[in-house]
Image: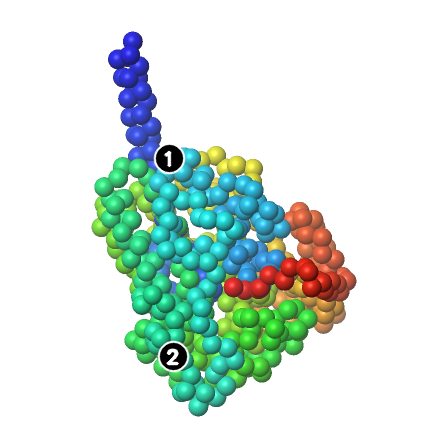
Amino acid sequence: MKKSLLTLLALVSAIHTAIAAEKPNIVFVFADDLTFESIGAYGLTDCKTPNLDRLVKNGASFTHAYNMGAWGGAVCVASRAMINSGAFVNRAQAAIKEKPHWSEMMKQAGYKTYMTGKWHVPGAPRFDVVKFPTAGMPKGSGYNRPKSKEDYENGWKPWDKKQGGFWEGGTHWSEVVANHSLDFIKQAKEDDKPFFMYLSFNASHDPRQSPKEYIDMYPLDKIKLPKNYLNLYPYKDEIGCGPGLRDEKLAPFPRTEFAVKVHRQEYFAIITHMDAQIGRILDALEATGKADNTYIIFTADHGLACGHHGLFGKQNMYDHSMRVPFMISGPGIKPGSQFDMPIYLQDAMATSLDLASIEKPEQVEFKSLMPLIKGEQKVQYESIYGKYINLQRMIAKGDWKLIAYPKAGVVRLFNTKKDPDEMNDLASKPEYAPKIKELKAELKELQKAMGDTLDIDKPAQPKKKQDKKGKKAAKTNK
């Protein structure tokens, strides 16, 4: 009897092992502050990303992947809460604390889970293996720089390790993330258990530091200004993007062409340096012999203005700050395929559950991309919703985008097909009044579905000041 029981247990264990072995490996690579236009293969800027271009070539690209926005200045906190809980933005703040995380869903399905790099989610990372977890951003950003060419010459340099930041510890943090990733990949090569890797770079967040050879790839006299460059954004104060916001005070007010070029030089350099580290990871995965059963998903938590529209941060509703690269490669994904329908970047989580044959729990509101990839459907979301605290709301539908600034009493209307740089505001033209009315009505319905109670037709009310015994307001944009 005892022998029969042991035989049965061994058989069950063997079956579980066989089932687990059939599951694909999932590698999720996550960048910070990375705008969609930074991918070299897209040809929108001079930024060089040869390894991310490999993902574009070898898999599927989603050209209109959006973040929903945020409840605070640290947009990455909201984005990461959404992707790890699966809940939409207005429910994610509670869900990330109360519901199972993405990693726990994968672990329950038999995956060995691994995480390295930026976390910035309440509580400790819930993975089997955690290496080099970092919260927020590296310290050491320079503010209000450069004020002039002389100020630039005498200021800190991105390759100076004495400045700390990404250089804290002696090795650039992007290299540290890659080093730890390679260690796990080497171990996973010998393991039959499927793995889920969550590889989260702090790059390309400021301080935008990288080795000098990467800065040298982008001579200042070759850096181009964005087409929609402005010295000052006209509604910066009313939308919470004035000098008081950490991201925005990185460069002087009013903006100068020189300052924008310096920041874009450093931005492109840290992206290219990160890309080199991603290349090391891709090469290591191919060397395991498991690449044929591995899906790689790459995206970022949000974009970044870095000089567009007179803005520098991600706390706005323009595409440069809400839209990110999104690529997926792996078995059954047609190389070089492109999908232009709007999605949310957080669809990555639901997609991984689908690929791993995990039933999607109710808490996950985002959707798998596989029906789009397989050609089973053409639309993921009828419209895209965006928010920034109580000062901005957005709806994008078809060729149109409506942005509402309640405090300023302003709406902005763009035809993003004809005007992809969002430079020609049509809101003041009488002939577009019906379109504004239509989109505002749809935005209000979308707000209801999202659990958003802000009245976009009335100015946002200022927050009450806390008394001395009250807790200090949370610092924004860490």
Say which mark, if any, is on residue 4.
Answer: none
Q: Nearer the viewer, mark 2 or mark 1?
A: 2
Kind of element beneath mark 2: loop
Residue at the image point whose x is 31% and y is 25% from the top: 13
79 vs 60, left or right, is right
Residue at 68%, 59% in the rendered image: 470
Query: Amino acid under label 2?
Result: Lys
Please determine whether, in this image, residue 461 is positioned above or below residue 213. Answer: above
Q: Is residue 451 above or below residue 232?
A: above
Quadrant of residue 395 in the image?
Answer: bottom right
Expressed as whole percent of the image width and height from the top left, the position of residue 314 reads 54, 66
Q: Quadrant of residue 47?
A: bottom left
In the drawing, does residue 216 fall left or right of residue 408?
A: left
The residue labelled by disc 2 is 157
**Image point (40%, 87%), residue name:** 153
Residue named by callout 1: 110
Q: x, y percentage for residue 401? A: 62, 62
143 sits to left or right of 447: left
Question: What x and y, as percent, mark residue 100?
Answer: 50, 40
Closest to the observer: 290 or 105?
Answer: 105
How crowded pointer 2 is (Cα within 10 Å; few <14, some 14-19, many 20+) is rated as some
Q: Residue furthest top?
A: 1
Is 65 or 197 nearer to us in this picture? 197
Q: Is residue 103 left or right of residue 244?
A: left
Q: Earlier in the sequence, mark 2 or mark 1?
A: 1
Label 1 SS:
loop
- Front in this rendered view, residue 69 or 205: 205
Q: Quadrant of the N terminus?
A: top left
